[in-house]
Amino acid sequence: MGQSNRFHPGSKAPNNGVYVEVGENGDPVVNPKSIHLHKGDRFPETSNDERHWTRKRKP
C-alpha cells in the first residue's frame, strides 16, 4: 500500500514539506494557498470546502 496523496483539513502531515490546494478531482486551482508544514502538523482549512491539500511537486 502506498501513502495517500490527498489530505483533508485537520489531518496530520505525514512528512515535512510544502503543500498546496487542489480541486476536488486533483484539478489545478487558480491562486492556490501554499503552506509549509512539519511532520505531525495539522492541515488548516482550505479556501473552499471542495478542495484538498497535496504535496507540492519539485520542479
Image (spheres, rainbow, N blue to C red):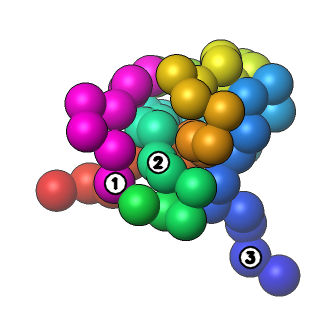
Which residue is disc 2 drawn over?
22
**Distance (Cα) linking label 1 and label 2:** 5 Å
Q: Nearer the viewer, residue 51 or 7?
A: 51
Number of marks present in the image shown: 3
The residue that appears at 46% across and 22% down in the rendered structure is 36
Q: Give the range drawn in magenta.
A: 28-35
Would you identify the image quadrant in which residue 15 lies?
A: top right
Q: How crowded is mark 1: few (under 14 residues within 10 Å), some or many (20 or more)?
A: few
Report which residue position mark 1 lands on: 28
Q: Can residue 21 be seen in this view?
A: yes
Q: Nearer the viewer, mark 3 or mark 2?
A: 2
Q: Is mark 2 on a helix, strand or loop?
A: strand
Looking at the rendered structure, the secondary structure element under dot 1 is loop
34, 46: nearer the viewer: 46
Do the CB atoms of the residues marked 1 and 2 lie less than 8 Å apart? yes
Mark 1 and mark 3: span between their CA atoms? 23 Å
Give the image location of residue 41, x and y in percent.
72, 20
Secondary structure mostly taken by the magenta-highlighted segment of the chain: loop
Q: Which amino acid does label 1 sit on?
A: Pro
Q: Name the foreground residue: 57 vs 31.
A: 31
The amino acid type of the residue labelled 3 equals Gly
